[in-house]
Structures are given as C-alpha cells and as structure tokens.
Image (spheres, rainbow, N blue to C red):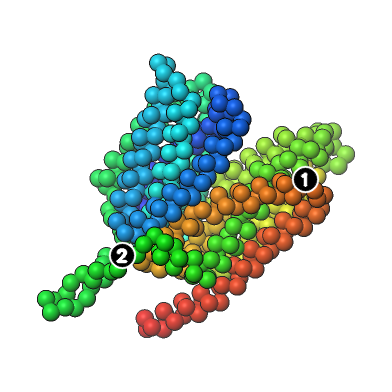
Amino acid sequence: MTFFQFHPNVRLRIALSFLTNILSNMVIPFMSIYFARTLGTTIAGTATTISIAVALISATIGGHYADRVGRKKMMLIGEGVALLAYVIMTFANSPIWHSAGLTLIMTVISTASWGLSKPAVEAMLIDVSGTDTRKAIYRINYWSNNLAISIAGMVGGFFFSDYLFELLLVASVMSLVALLVTAFFMKETMPAEEMKFTDDGVQPSSPKRVSMYDRYKEVLLDRRFLIYLISSVLIVSVEMNLNGYIGIRLAQDIHHTPWFPGMSATIDGLPLVGVLRTENTLAVVLLSLFVGRLLKGNSDTRMMLFAMFLNVAGYTYLVFGNQPIMLMLLMLIATIGELTYVPLKQSLLVQLVPDHARSSYMALSSMTNRVAIMLSGLNMIIGGFLPSGAMALFILLTGVAGIGLMASILPSLKEAEQKVHHAAV
C-alpha cells in the first residue's frame, strides 16, 4: 500500500508531523546548550529533568481525555498550546526583547503540548487503519520522523546560535498552519458510541464515565500490555546507550586507532561516535522503505524477535569493541534490526489495545522512550564501577530479557486472534 492510499487523516498527520518535527527539532534539542550558556548548567540540567516529568504527566492526561472528548479536540488543544509557547518564545528572543527565563518556561510548556496531543494522534492512526495497512503506515511514519530529525539536526546545528529568532518565527508559523489544518481538514475518528435498544427505539448507550485513576488502573492491570511495556523499555534502553555509556566509553578508550589493523588512517573516539550516529541516521533514512519489501512472506513474529536480537547484539558489541570498522559494521546490523522490528512491534501493540481506551493505552506506550533514556542513564553510573566486558554482558542480558518477555505474550495474542477469526466465520 502506498502513501496516497492511506486514509486522508493519516496522510495529513504524516505530512504535518514531518514539517513540525523538522522545526521543533531544529530548536528544542539545542535548548539545553542555550540554557547552559544563559542560565547555567545546573538550571539547564534541572530543566531537562522537569521537561521529562511534564511530558509524562501531560501524556497521562492527554491519553485519558482523548478517550472521553475525542482525538481531534485533544490534538487541537495540544497544537494550540504549542503555538502559544512558540509565539512567546519568539518574542522572548526577538531583537527588541530577550528573556532566557521565559524561554525556559515556554520550552517546558511546548513539551507538555506534545504529551497532550501524542496519545490522540497514535489512537487516531489505529482508528482509521486496518491490519493490512498498519505496518505500511508505521514504516512510512517511522521513516518520515527519522528523515525530519536528520534534516533538523543538520540545519539546527548551523543556524541555532545565530538565527534562533528566525527559527522560532518559522516554527510559530508552522504551528499555526498545523492548528488550522487539524481544525478544518482533520476528521474525528473516536469510535462511535455503542447503541442499545430501548422503548423509544435504538439510542446511543451512555457508557459510565470512568475516572482517570480507574482508567489507568485498568490499563496497568492488563498483564499482557504491562509485559509489552516492560519489554519495550528494556529493548529500547539498549539502543539509548549510544548517547550515554557507549559514547563515553568510546571517547575514553579509542585514541588514534587505525580503521583497519595496520592502516595508517586513524580516528579518535569522539569523532567515531559522530560517525556511528550519522551512519545510524543515514541507514534509517535510506533503508527503511526497502525493508518492508524484503519481509513479505515471512512470519511477522519470528522476524520481529530475530530483528530485536540483531539490534541488541549490534549494540552489545559497541559496548566493548574497539575496532572502528567492526563498530561500523555492527552498527549497520543493529540499525537493520531496528528498522525491521519497530514497525512490526507497533503493529503488535494494536492487538493489545481495546477500542474504548486506545488513547490511554497509547499514552503509556508513548512514554517508553523516555523511561528507556532514564534506564540507560543508570548504565552510565553502573559503568563507572564495571569494566566494559561486564557492562556488555549486563546490557546484553537486559536486551535478551526484553526479547524473552515479548516472546512470552505472543502465544496468547495468536490464540486470541484465532478466536476472533473463528467467531467471524
């Protein structure tokens, strides 16, 4: 299935996400440098921690209300908050006025806007897609997001310091465009109310209003979904070590190391980390659209588990390996594993999510990466006490545990799918 065969909502959302991701990633990731320079490193670090906490809280709220008031309303609220934050940030960094403190507050608020709208967006993609289209949607969306991040990283690196006002101005305009497109062209997709028969005919049933506490209690008591979340955090945390323990270890251990044994050309650890990150980004952008074609005819579950193992094995070598060319080869293998398993894992998630609480489930799922980042941060602390070989074993076991947990829920999912199929027949 091609992009133009998707539901109009999906096409609009992918296009808008691509543009807004470019603009937001040209600004937000560099804000820690901005705050360190203007307010000090302590405040910059505190702001980063607060932003993560705010994102988690706002996603929890956004997920609950997207299941009560609708996907579109929460997307509009999130985009409206983002527009307000970017407009104020623009004025706070204009030629006539400058306020680093207000910029910090608005940066945190812009992070909250992501949490308010993200669960609704994820639920909307499920609402309007079928099992035959979801893998294609997730694969193209994944490619689009990575392409946007790679473009934003290059552009932001060159323009952030000298053209922050202009970047924020463009981001404000794009946020306004996103708000207007959502308001006038996006359709509500929340499942319609169930109908019931009464003396007055067929009427919409009035489902009991569930409190946020009861809704998330229901989600967290869903054993299969909880195992899925824990598995995802463990697997993703392995990859997140590239920006933490792996990067630090390579910078400390690799000095003037030949690319090949006996070769005169050498490289140091810090530049090598940059090369590996660039390789990962380019591989994702260039290969992700071709991976789907290669997977046709293969079992999704077996391929997903095998791809997860490739990803974990590749990053495990990066934890202790010191040969640059081998590091690049294993990074490529890890990236191919990532490209393969991510869309399959996202499609699997859909089978776990009930219709009446899609946004609430997706809210917790959207926290996976942020929790994985915190878990990988602990590895930096542990790595200060263990040699690289022991850390490699520890990180490998973390990934294998995640794969094992994911494999443990597959039989019950297959059984449930077969029951639905037999019932339909």
Residue sitting at x 67%, y 65%: 401
Residue sitting at x 41%, y 43%: 113
Report the Cα–Cα distance between label 2 and label 1: 50 Å
Q: Position of residue 189 (x, y in %)?
A: 30, 58
Residue sitting at x 39%, y 24%: 91
Q: Residue furthest left?
A: 200
When the figure is inspected, residue 104 is found, relative to residue 216, above or below; the finding is above
Q: Residue furthest top?
A: 96
Q: Looking at the image, which is closer to me, 233 or 1? A: 233
Residue type at mark 2 is Arg
Residue to which mark 1 is pinned: 384
Q: Looking at the image, which is closer to me, 284 or 230? A: 230
Please identify, in this view, whether the residue under mark 2 or under mark 1 is nearer the observer: 2
Q: Looking at the image, which is closer to me, 290 or 373? A: 373
Q: Position of residue 182 (x, y in %)?
A: 30, 45
Q: Position of residue 205 (x, y in %)?
A: 23, 71
Kindly indicate the quadrant of the structure image that contains residue 265: top right
When the figure is inspected, residue 351 is found, relative to residue 317, above or below; the finding is below
Residue sitting at x 42%, y 29%: 89
Q: Position of residue 126 (x, y in %)?
A: 39, 61
Query: Which circle marks residue 152 in the picture?
Result: none
Q: Quadrant of the C terminus?
A: bottom left
What is the secondary structure assignment of the residue under circle 1? loop
- From this viewpoint, is residue 303 visible? no
Left or right: residue 23 compared with residue 12? right
Residue to which mark 2 is pinned: 209
Category of crowding for the residue at label 1, using alpha-carbon neighbours closer than 10 angstroms: few (below 14), some (14–19), many (at least 20): few
Q: Quadrant of the N terminus?
A: bottom left
* Number of on-image labels: 2
- Please tell me which of labels 2 and 1 falls first in the chain: 2
Kindly indicate the quadrant of the structure image that contains residue 358: bottom left
